[in-house]
Image (cartoon, grey):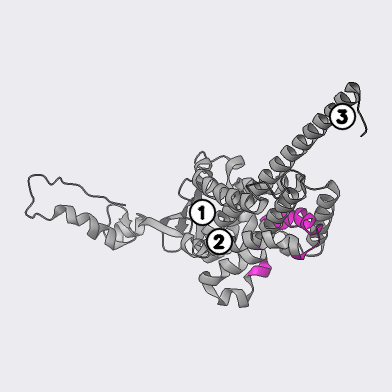
């Protein structure tokens, strides 16, 4: 039997500890990298939904959301088994174009508009955010699989279970806290700015050459067809004075004008005025919260108006309930909610 000197044993033990330290650092980097990718994917899924809410309505967008993104998670986990490992590297190309792809004229063709608000958001998500999210999940899963520590069979928490659990957890946390950042009304915390920022962070997780290729392709498309690369609908969604002027330019031929708009906790709030019939509406995303007929000189003189009138007569009927006298118990309090 070969004998080792104490010095050689000490050297072997020292090298073993160094290898373990290197493996631990490498595994930590892989774990943090995967967590970052999954967090960005969960954020994109929420921002994509918020981007579509003002167009199709929260109900139409939220209905297919859970099964759609569960399918994105399942497809992302299965992607490493059926595709080449370099496929997720096209994610920067998709991330560069994603903010404008959802508003592309290609997604407003007569065939898609015929599907209505029930299926058009579903098709839009399938063609834009879902493929990108699947690529991010796939890349995070493959990163953990290739790591020495997480690929051990004896490890109790397999990469697939970790990726699934963390992605679903991140979605719930981000969905709860993301709308709170829209309350201050700043451009940097608007949904459009956050969308651009998250897509830029996604590009930073991949080699620089992939991002440059994505930018080159996008600029080439913009040079050939500006309307396809940067649609007017996307420009109007930017919460700046330029976006507001562009929105009014689009709405003026239809007799509408946006007086004010901004991000809110409950959605994208805007005040609209009909310049033909002279009334104003308060809108949140795709829902009308209320409105009033304006007190013009013509209505004051010809119709005898003395104040603005609500657009929806049912609001007055609901408020009139407070004037009805009936039998009340001693414990009952007089309360009314008028919206």
Residue for point 82% across, 32% down:
16
Question: Which SS type dominates the magenta stretch?
Answer: helix
Query: What numbered label is drawn on residue 258?
Result: 1
Q: Position of residue 286 (x, y in %)?
A: 47, 60
Q: Closer to the camera: disc 3 or disc 2? A: 3
Q: Name which of mark 1 and mark 2 comes first in the sequence.
A: 2
Residues at discs 3 and 1 in contact (Cβ within 8 Å) = no
Q: Which residue reaches farthest right?
A: 2
Give the label on residue 12, or none. 3
- Rendered image quadrant of residue 99: bottom right
Range of residues picked out in magenta? 82-107
**Residue that appears at 76% across and 35% down:** 25
Q: Name the mark nearer the viewer: 3 or 1.
A: 3
Relative to 20, does residue 195 appear above or below in the rendering? below
- 271 horizontally vs 231: left or right: left
Mark sitting earlier along the chain (3/2)? 3
Label tally = 3
- 172 or 317, nearer to the observer: 172
Q: With 270 as the anchor, is 214 left or right in this view? A: right
**CB under 8 Å between discs 1 and 2:** yes
**Is residue 102 among what the camera can see?**
no
**SS for callout 3:** helix
Mark 3 and mark 2: Cα distance apart in space: 76 Å
| Mark 1, secondary structure of its residue | strand
Name the residue carrying label 2: 251
Compared to residue 155, the image places residue 90 above or below, namely below
The residues bearing labels 3 and 1 have C-alpha atoms spaced at a distance of: 74 Å
Q: Is residue 339 left or right of residue 102?
A: left
Q: In this rendering, does residue 26 appear at all?
A: yes
Sequence-earlier tag: 3 or 1: 3
Residue drawn at 18 percent across, 56 percent down: 321
């Amino acid at each position: 039997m070969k004998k080792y000197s104490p010095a050689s044993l000490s050297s072997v033990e020292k090298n073993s500890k160094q290898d373990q330290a290197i493996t631990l650092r490498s595994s930590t980097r892989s774990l943090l990298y995967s967590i970052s990718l999954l967090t960005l994917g969960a954020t994109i899924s929420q921002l994509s939904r918020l981007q579509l809410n003002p167009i199709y309505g929260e109900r139409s967008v939220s209905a297919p959301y859970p099964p759609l993104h569960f399918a994105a998670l399942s497809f992302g986990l299965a992607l490493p088994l059926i595709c080449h490992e370099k496929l997720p590297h096209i994610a920067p190309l998709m991330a560069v174009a994603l903010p404008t792809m959802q508003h592309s004229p290609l997604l407003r063709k007569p065939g898609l508009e015929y599907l209505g608000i029930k299926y058009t958001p579903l098709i839009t998500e399938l063609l834009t955010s879902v493929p990108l999210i699947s690529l991010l999940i796939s890349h995070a899963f493959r990163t953990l699989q290739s790591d020495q520590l997480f690929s051990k069979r004896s490890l109790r928490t397999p990469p697939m279970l970790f990726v699934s659990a963390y992605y679903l957890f991140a979605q719930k946390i981000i969905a709860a806290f993301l709308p709170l950042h829209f309350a201050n009304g700043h451009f940097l915390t608007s949904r459009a700015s956050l969308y651009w920022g998250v897509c830029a962070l996604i590009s930073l997780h991949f080699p620089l050459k992939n991002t440059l290729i994505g930018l080159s392709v996008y600029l080439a498309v913009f040079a050939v067809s500006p309307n396809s690369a940067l649609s007017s609908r996307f420009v109007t969604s930017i919460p700046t004075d330029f976006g507001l002027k562009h929105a009014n330019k689009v709405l003026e031929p239809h007799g509408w004008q946006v007086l004010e708009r901004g991000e809110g906790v409950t959605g994208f709030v805007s005040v609209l005025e009909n310049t033909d019939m002279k009334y104003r509406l308060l809108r949140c995303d795709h829902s009308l919260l209320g409105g009033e007929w304006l007190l013009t000189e013509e209505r004051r003189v010809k119709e005898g108006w003395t104040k603005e009138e609500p657009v929806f007569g049912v609001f007055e009927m609901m408020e009139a309930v407070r004037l009805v006298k009936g039998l009340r118990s001693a414990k009952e309090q007089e309360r009314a909610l008028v919206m």
